[in-house]
Amino acid sequence: MKTALSIAGSDSCGGAGIQADVKTMTMNGVYAMSAVTALTAQNTTGVRAVLETPPEFLREQLDAVFEDIFPDAVKIGMLPSAELVRTIAERLRYYQAKNIVVDPVMAATSGSALMGSGTAEVLANELFPIAALVTPNIPEAAVLSGVTIREEGDMLCAAKRIGDAFGCAVLLKGGHSSGAADDLLYADGGFRWFRGERIENPNTHGTGCTLSSAVASNLAKGFTLDEAVQRAKSYLSCALAAMLDLGKGAGPIEHAFALNGCFADKK
Ligand SMILES: Nc1ncnc2c1ncn2[C@@H]1O[C@H](COP(=O)(O)OP(=O)(O)OP(=O)(O)O)[C@@H](O)[C@H]1O
Ligand SMILES: Cc1ncc(CO)c(N)n1
């Protein structure tokens, strides 16, 4: 069985972070592992508290995983501090980790900040160059590129700037746009749109985590980058379209929509 590692924060309400990644990887047919960067006390309405993992303990988790079950892909999510970024970059280079997907998480869907100031620059410098794919949303791409993003032309410009500056492929997600949910891939000097209808569902907590870990899962299985993005987008759209409705804020999506076997049967 192919394997994938999520290096991310824990989301106590289960819709984003490590919990979303493990569910997504499992549903996409790979064996999921985790290295926790932070504990968050959060729910669908906001983040109440964050406890950062000490860098030496994150390193212990990474060594424990890589020395035993070498992951076929790595997804990186919430990184609250520059020190944690440097720890991960050093370990991933040491192990020559492959199929690295970096989701540059800056804030939760609820708006709460998840990254310390100054960390974005270190993240970009240290981790983007070793990534197979970087997946910013529109506000994150604006910070990383310095481009104000209002329309498709701005998305092209921002994705190219980030990709060219750090030598990585970029998937600029369109979830925060006012129109359709169209994502833009910039890879090997070329652009490709992954078009998606906007699904009328206010419950979008963890969509970014889900998309990036689905891409990582599909890279682990050997799909090309284009195929992995297309498959990930289809999985995400189905999980959103299942219309799960939990919590008082922007709720989580239905990661297990495809389970019809006896263990998932309703009473
Ligand atoms: N209402 C929607 N209908 C269809 N697709 C959506 C919708 N909202 C987001 N998406 C898709 O979800 C994926 C994640 O995009 P988004 O821009 O929401 O990421 P994000 O802000 O990082 O997510 P989050 O912070 O909520 O985890 C993209 O493929 C985007 O097109
Ligand atoms: C732990 C964690 N990672 C990422 C996100 C972004 O959705 C979140 N809300 N929580």
Image (cartoon, rainbow, N blue to C red):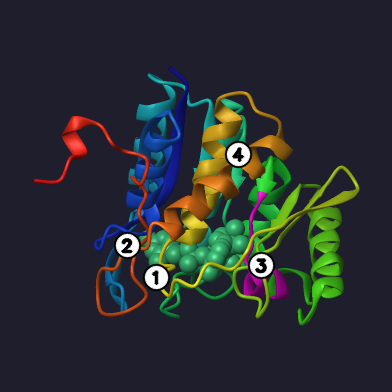
Gap between marks 4 and 1 measured at Cα: 27 Å
Task: Say which label, 3 or 4, has the lower sequence index.
Answer: 4
Task: Say which label, 4 or 1, has the lower sequence index.
Answer: 4
Gap between marks 3 and 4 measured at Cα: 21 Å
Magenta region, residue range: 134-142
Q: Nearer the viewer, mark 4 or mark 1?
A: 1
The disc label shown at residue 100, or none = 4
Residue 241 in view of the camera:
yes
Q: Nearer the viewer, mark 2 or mark 4?
A: 2
The residue wearing badge 2 is 244
Q: Quadrant of ligand 1?
A: bottom right
Identified at 57% across, 55% down, the residue is: 103
Q: Residues within 10 Å of mark 2 (few under 14, many from 20)?
A: some
Which type of secondary structure does the marked residue at label 3 adopt? Answer: loop
Image x and y of residue 212, in percent: 55, 49
Which type of secondary structure does the marked residue at label 2 adopt? Answer: loop
Q: Are marks 1 and 2 in contact (CB under 8 Å)?
A: yes
Query: As rendered, which of 126 and 196 lies closer to the eye?
Result: 196
Identified at 81% across, 54% down, the residue is: 163
Q: Amino acid at mark 1?
A: Asn
Gap between marks 1 and 2 measured at Cα: 8 Å
The residue wearing badge 3 is 174
Q: Are marks 2 and 4 in contact (CB under 8 Å)?
A: no
Task: Say which label, 3 or 2, has the lower sequence index.
Answer: 3
Q: On the image, which quarter does residue 40 sit in?
A: bottom left
Q: Is residue 141 magenta?
A: yes
Which type of secondary structure does the marked residue at label 1 adopt? Answer: loop
Gap between marks 1 and 3 measured at Cα: 16 Å
Identified at 76% across, 47% down, the residue is: 169
The disc label shown at residue 203, or none = 1
Task: Say which label, 2 or 4, has the lower sequence index.
Answer: 4
